[in-house]
Amino acid sequence: MSLLEVFYNKEAEQCYFQGCSNGGRMAHMAALKYLQMFNGIISGTPSMLKCEVGQNGASCLTDAELDVIKKWRQGPQNQAGEQLHPGGVRKVQKDSGGYRLTGKSESGGKLALLFAKGFGAYMAFEDDPGASCSPLDFDPETDPKRLGAMARVYNSDRPDLKTFIAAGGKMIVWHGWADAIVTPCKTID
């Protein structure tokens, strides 16, 4: 007997799924794979100023720092200039994603690096390279093809939700602009 049945003396009339970050990916996966399971789904994932002449960079961004941000926003490309994944972080604030990207200790250390290392070592490839794998080992010329098998397992980004909608499902999707690990550009795409 469910808690709803005990408390309300009847079964649930509606069923909803809500998730954020990896849970947001799971929400999309639910809409693609479990068409009849949920009546509605909520999927969520995800200002910078240039230094003036004479400023020291403690309260502004140098040209080199702005170049790094441009690369984060651009996203990874191969040598031919082909986009491998949508651009990265759109907004980096001192109190949010910036620390996760740069590894400053004020926000818990190098979270993005740890995520990339664990994902690359144990989840990204059909044959796990293991603990010796480093994000710096990733080859943008050859490794994207190796991601295909596991992408079919993890990716929930097919935009065709006609079957889910036809089954009466509804979905709200949101994403924070400062999400440093799950780019909002992927959600937009």
Image: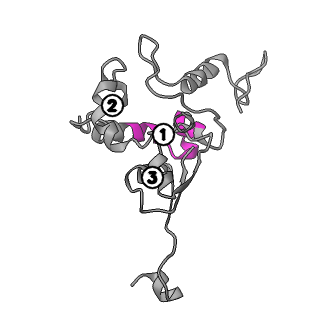
Image position, residue 186 (x, y; %): 51, 35
Image coloring type: one colour
The stretch drawn in magenta includes residue 107: yes
Check disc 3: other Cα within 10 Å, few if <14, some if 14-19, many if 20+: many
User: Which element is circle 1 on?
Assistant: loop
Q: Which residue is mark 1?
A: 159
Which quadrant of the rendered structure holds the N terminus?
Answer: bottom left
In the image shown, does 177 or 174 lie closer to the viewer? Answer: 174
Residue 14 appears in the rendering: yes
Looking at this rendering, what residue extends furthest in the front direction?
166
Image position, residue 23 (x, y; %): 46, 53
Q: Identify residue type, mark 3.
A: Ala
User: Which element is circle 3 on?
Assistant: helix
Q: Earlier in the sequence, mark 3 or mark 1?
A: 3
Q: Nearer the viewer, mark 2 or mark 3?
A: 3
Q: Earlier in the sequence, mark 2 or mark 3?
A: 3
Check disc 2: other Cα within 10 Å, few if <14, some if 14-19, many if 20+: some
Q: Quadrant of residue 84?
A: top left
Q: Identify residue type, mark 1.
A: Pro
Q: Identify residue type, mark 2.
A: Ser
Q: Which residue is mark 2?
A: 134
Residue at the spot 39% in from the left edge and 56% down from the top edge: 34
Gap in angstroms between the C-alphas marked 2 and 3: 33 Å
Q: Which mark is residue 31?
A: 3
What segment is highlighted magenta in the picture? 98-116
Q: Is 42 placed above or below 14 here? A: above
Q: Is 35 placed above or below 179 here? A: below
Gap in angstroms between the C-alphas marked 3 and 1: 11 Å
Check disc 1: other Cα within 10 Å, few if <14, some if 14-19, many if 20+: few
Task: Examine the residues drawn in magenta and state their main secondary structure.
Answer: helix
In-image side of 146 versus 100 (left or right)? left
Gap in angstroms between the C-alphas marked 2 and 1: 32 Å
